Image: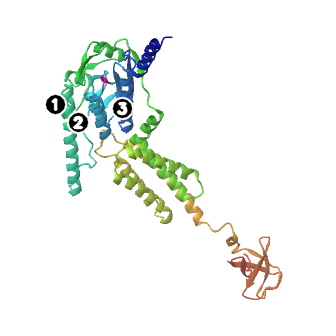
């Protein structure tokens, strides 16, 4: 081969290695986002957008069903969508799903917002950790100020996002300030969303030829008939997302405390202590993702302490009841913070049954250990006290006695002849103190 042709071939191969592969927009990527919005949700969306941009996907479809979530990751997810390099379509689906609280922010931020019939959106007000009613003290006033700041921020945030996407700014404001929630048909009528569709195919058919602005360019959506490729969460992200659910995190805390409670009350069982420690480590990971209330956590710890105190300070169950009340109060406050929107631990359906079961187990442990502690010594040399035997030698005042099938060195206060019945009155190390046995009735 001539040198000139060889150089041309090498140049062609080099260009083939350096130049990017041709961009193919023959598919649409899809992710499903269910449950509470957390940092794991943000990571899943970030990975999906990066992968979609790298693959040259025509669009990313986010099928959303959430009761709300953490404000920080929600803000980050909105930023991801606003700055995405491809169209991001948020579809509240399937029927019966909702885009509550944090979900409303994500839906409004999308290039295209759609909902299935029978779905709802709204209720984006931040949750107060305070509660209302009664006389208001200084702490309540501080809480009000903090909540007012959070509400003003979230209101301004959702207004700016709605304005950027050309959606109903007034309704967005009401969703935060008045916890306004509406159905899919109402959202379409009010200009909160763009479409109501009965599935992906129906949505893609309605979107055919629509132009959306992505960055500084307008992109025409030609999605009908394209291949749909799901993007699954990684195993690690899925696991973190699971334990970062407030309900799961609360159960991990209770399970961890129960395991350590059993281990401390009955040392040597090993298994409850190991399981409890693992549960608390997982809860600690969840608390790195979820904002939580220290007051709620301390109340739960105090509840465990009160239940443990019942063993040493018998109160006929009053300390157990007080501990259960502290657990209920702490559990209900654990995630009652402004940073988590629209999410709370179900009180009657989850918290009460778990705490009642916890209290029942604690009561059984206290009862069992209390009975064992109230019994006399049943093993070791101490059980010899009160036993009778016979003197094997003359005790004058020392000698040997035969008690419980064994010979023992013994002392007596008075002389006792060999072969007489004796009774053990004390144990001094490995030496017995005896006296002449009394006649039994």
Kindly indicate the quadrant of the structure image that contains residue 127.
top left
Q: How crowded is the residue under tag 1: few (<14 C-alpha within 10 Å), some, or many (20+)?
A: few
Disc nearer the start of the sequence (3/1): 3
Residue that carries the numbered disc 1 in the rendered image: 170
Q: CA distance from mark 2 to mark 3?
A: 28 Å
Kindly indicate the quadrant of the structure image that contains residue 7.
top left
- Residue 430 is one of the magenta-drawn residues: no
Disc nearer the start of the sequence (2/3): 3
Q: How crowded is the residue under tag 2: few (<14 C-alpha within 10 Å), some, or many (20+)?
A: some
Q: Which mark is residue 46?
A: 3
Label 3's element? helix
Between disc 2 and disc 1, the foreground one is 1
Q: Nearer the viewer, residue 291 or 331?
A: 291
- Residue 86 is one of the magenta-drawn residues: yes
Q: Which mark is residue 428?
A: none
Kindly indicate the quadrant of the structure image that contains residue 158.
top left
Measuring 26% from the left and 19% from the top, which residue is drawn there? Answer: 195
Between disc 3 and disc 1, the foreground one is 3
Q: Is residue 368 left or right of residue 342?
A: right
Position of residue 79 measured from the top left corner of the image (x, y, whole percent):
28, 33
Position of residue 414 measured from the top left corner of the image (x, y, whole percent):
74, 88
Position of residue 357 measured from the top left corner of the image (x, y, whole percent):
48, 48
Residue that carries the numbered disc 2 in the rendered image: 179
User: On the rendered image, what quadrant is the C terminus found in?
Assistant: bottom right
Q: CA distance from mark 3 to mark 1?
A: 29 Å
Between disc 2 and disc 3, the foreground one is 3
Magenta span of residues: 85-90
């Amino acid at each position: 081969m001539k040198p000139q042709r060889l150089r041309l071939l090498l140049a062609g191969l080099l260009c083939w290695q350096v130049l990017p592969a041709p961009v193919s927009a023959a598919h649409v990527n899809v992710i499903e986002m269910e449950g509470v919005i957390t940092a794991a949700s943000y990571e899943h969306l970030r990975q999906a957008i990066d992968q979609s941009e790298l693959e040259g996907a025509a669009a990313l479809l986010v099928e959303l069903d959430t009761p709300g979530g953490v404000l920080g990751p929600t803000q980050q997810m909105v930023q991801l969508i606003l700055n995405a390099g491809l169209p991001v379509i948020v579809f509240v689906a399937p029927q019966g799903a909702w885009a509550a609280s944090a979900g409303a922010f994500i839906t409004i931020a999308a290039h295209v917002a759609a909902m299935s019939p029978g779905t709802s959106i709204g209720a984006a007000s931040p949750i107060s950790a305070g509660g209302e009613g009664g006389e208001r003290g200084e702490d309540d006033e501080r809480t009000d100020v903090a909540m007012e700041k959070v509400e003003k921020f979230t209101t301004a945030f959702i207004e700016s996002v709605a304005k950027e996407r050309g959606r109903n700014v007034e309704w967005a404001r009401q969703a935060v300030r008045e916890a306004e929630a509406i159905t899919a048909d109402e959202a379409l009528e009010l200009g909160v969303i763009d479409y109501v569709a009965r599935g992906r195919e129906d949505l893609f058919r309605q979107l055919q030829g629509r132009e959306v602005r992505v960055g500084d360019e307008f992109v025409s959506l030609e999605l009908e008939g394209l291949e749909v490729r799901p993007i699954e969460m990684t195993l690690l992200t899925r696991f973190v997302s699971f334990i970062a659910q407030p309900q799961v995190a609360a159960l991990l805390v209770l399970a961890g405390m129960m395991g350590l409670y059993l281990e401390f009350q009955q040392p040597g069982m090993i298994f409850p202590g190991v399981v409890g420690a693992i549960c608390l480590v997982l809860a600690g990971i969840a608390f790195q993702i979820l904002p939580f209330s220290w007051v709620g956590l301390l109340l739960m710890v105090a509840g465990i302490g009160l239940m443990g105190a019942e063993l040493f300070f018998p109160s006929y169950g009053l300390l157990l009841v007080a501990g259960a009340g502290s657990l209920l109060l702490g559990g209900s406050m654990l995630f009652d913070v402004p940073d988590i929107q629209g999410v709370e631990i179900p009180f009657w359906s989850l918290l009460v049954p778990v705490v009642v079961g916890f209290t029942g187990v604690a009561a059984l442990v206290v009862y069992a250990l209390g009975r064992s502690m109230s019994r006399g010594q049943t093993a070791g040399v101490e059980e010899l006290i009160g036993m009778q035997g016979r003197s094997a030698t003359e005790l004058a005042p020392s000698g040997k006695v035969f008690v419980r099938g064994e010979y023992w060195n013994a002392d007596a206060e008075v002389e006792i002849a060999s072969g007489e019945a004796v009774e053990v009155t004390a144990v001094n190390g490995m030496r017995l103190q005896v006296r002449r046995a009394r006649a039994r009735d």
